[in-house]
Image (tube, rainbow, N blue to C red):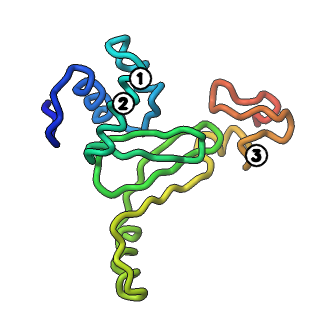
Amino acid sequence: MKLTSGLKNTPSRLNILSILKKTKKPLDASEIYKLVKNKTDLATVYRTLETFVKKGLINKLEFGEGKYRYEAKKGDHHHLICTCCDKIDDIKDKFIEAWGGKIKAEKGFLVKSHALEFFGLCKCCQKLCDCCDPKCKCCRKKCKCPQEICKCCRK
């Protein structure tokens, strides 16, 4: 694999880009750091991610968690984010993609880019936890599905 955008093909850069291309969900810097397995330091991971974002090689995402997540460019797609277990799935829909044309026709506004995330409960968490709030009302602990789910919420 070679980098584009005039970047040097360093082992750290190639390794980080390879990790992002192989994963199916957006990762934060600490997750990427764990996957590089001591082949680079955390500061290099952060610098490399910011360089990749500036060069347009990857997307930088923010899901209201207080941290950024990164993913390889995959074309237009959106995310389903479980507020209980933090699972993230991609979703691609022609209906959503058609909105850009409709907005242009109705409002005269040219959409250059957009971001759309859906927050809710995945199938697993819907079965295991009946709370709609990421903080369980009965014990005030954050639910985790399925291993760490609060025992008092299990049905």
User: Mark 1: which secondary structure?
Assistant: helix
> Which residue position holds label 3?
131
The answer to whether mark 3 and mark 1 are in CB contact below 8 A is no
Q: Is mark 2 on a helix, strand or loop?
A: helix
Label 2 near label 1: C-beta < 8 Å? Answer: yes
Sooner in the amino-acid sequence: mark 3 or mark 1: 1
- Residue at numbered disc 1: 43
Residue in front for this viewpoint, 136 or 154: 136
Q: Is residue 138 left or right of residue 16?
A: right
Which amino acid type is shown beneath numbered disc 1? Answer: Ala
Residue 150 location, quadrant: top right
Please tell me whether mark 3 sits on a helix, a strand or a loop.
Answer: loop
Relative to 63, 103 lies left or right: left
| The disc label shown at residue 47, or none | 2
Residue at image location 49% in from the left, 42% down from the top? 88
What's under tag 3, amino acid-wise? Cys
